[in-house]
Image (tube, rainbow, N blue to C red):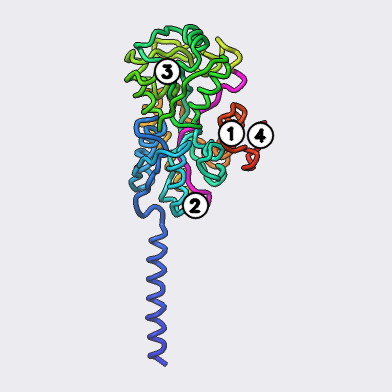
Amino acid sequence: MKTKTLITGIALAAFTMVSSAAMAQEKFPSRNITDVVTWSAGGGTDVTNRVITAAMSKFIGTNINVINKTGGVSGSVGLLEGFAAKPDGYTMIGLSESNTTAAVMGGWDKRVDVFDFFIATSSPDVVSVGKDTPWKSMEELVTFIKANPGKVRVGAGGAGSLHHINVLAFAKGIEGELNFIPYPGSSASQNAALSGEIDMVVTTVAEQNQLIQSGDFRPLGTLTEKPYTLGDMTIPSALEQYPSLKKHLPISQAIGFAVRKEVPTEVKKTIAKAFISALNSDEVKKFAAENHYELVGAFGAEANKTMARLESLFSYTLWDLGAAKVDPATLGIPKPE
């Protein structure tokens, strides 16, 4: 009887040790986290994710390693890789509003509701030309575009991206034809404008800031309702100059990251706490101020609602402009209100 009791006690102790070890292993985070950024290195999504995750690492207690997985349509390669990972919180997907068009552009067959989002920053798009181009104003550029259909080469980060949509909406609004050349990210499209490979580029003020300040880019107009102040410069609003652009514009940017919806709630709470702490840190505030980003700090239901609205707006805008490959209605995407 004593032997049986002893064996039972040993077994119970062993079970307790195993259970304790399992519980310790389940504590989040117990190892490094990977952030799979869907756009190219050097672009707004990449830089924002690197700054935010570096700050988050100090609060969450482990490293967050950023990797770039570009390609596909609307960042679909990175989306697919991030979605395929185990939903345990150890894989984040660095993305932007442009990824919401992946489904209608044929990149994959899922909607944004498979993710929970964390929106960090936003910056308005600006139409700029290289310093060696002849156009000194938006009026000169538009006049040339209308007189020379398809001659002006314009670049933007990714087919189906926010910048691509803005290019399409801009061309539609001025009733002109542009030669659109897609690039894997904003940085790549800006480099093409620097080298003279393209004439015109549409990316954010934050992404173009240094190139504008250095004189390498000449900003002709923001795709916002009001002019934008950049240092000592005031960039005019293209929407004020061409009211017809207001049919599809402006469209807000949303940069951040997401995790699978199935990630445990407690894990998402830990990530959210580190996310908000990072956005309140001095280094992130300094980054935003110096690079012309607005800090958003939305997560949970608020961020998910924003991304769902952008999915609807972007998807139907692309469909109406004849650029989408898949009818958003067939994907169950509701029309924008």
Q: Which residue sits at x=35%, y=34%?
A: 41
Give the CA separation, mark 4 to mark 2.
29 Å
Q: Residue at x 37, y 48 (%)?
A: 33
Amino acid on which disc 2 is placed: Val
Magenta run includes residue 223: no
Tag 4 residue: 335
Q: Taking 335 as reference, is 63 left or right? A: left
Residue 98 image point, x, y percent:
50, 33
Q: Nearer the viewer, mark 4 or mark 2?
A: 4
Amino acid type at mark 4 = Lys
Compared across the picture, whether 58 is left or right of 275 comes to left
The image shows residue 171, relative to residue 234, as above or below, that is: below
Secondary structure state at the residue bearing disc 3: strand
The C terminus lies in which quarter of the figure?
top right
Q: Magenta segment: does it hold 255?
A: yes
Q: Nearer the viewer, mark 1 or mark 2?
A: 1
Q: Secondary structure at mark 1?
A: helix
How far apart are the two marked residues, 1 and 2, measured between alpha carbons?
27 Å
Q: Looking at numbered disc 3 in the image, what kind of residue is underneath it?
A: Met
Q: Residues within 10 Å of mark 3 (few under 14, many from 20)?
A: many
Q: CA distance from mark 1 to mark 3?
A: 24 Å
Location of residue 143 with respect to 39 vertically, above or below:
above
Question: In this figure, which residue is indicated by the disc labeled 3?
Answer: 200
Counting residues from the start of the chain, the first of labels 1 and 2 encountered is: 2
Tell me, yes or no, whether the two marked residues, 1 and 3, touch with CB atoms within 8 Å. no
At which x and y percent is residue 71? 41, 38
Q: Which residues are magenta?
A: 246-264
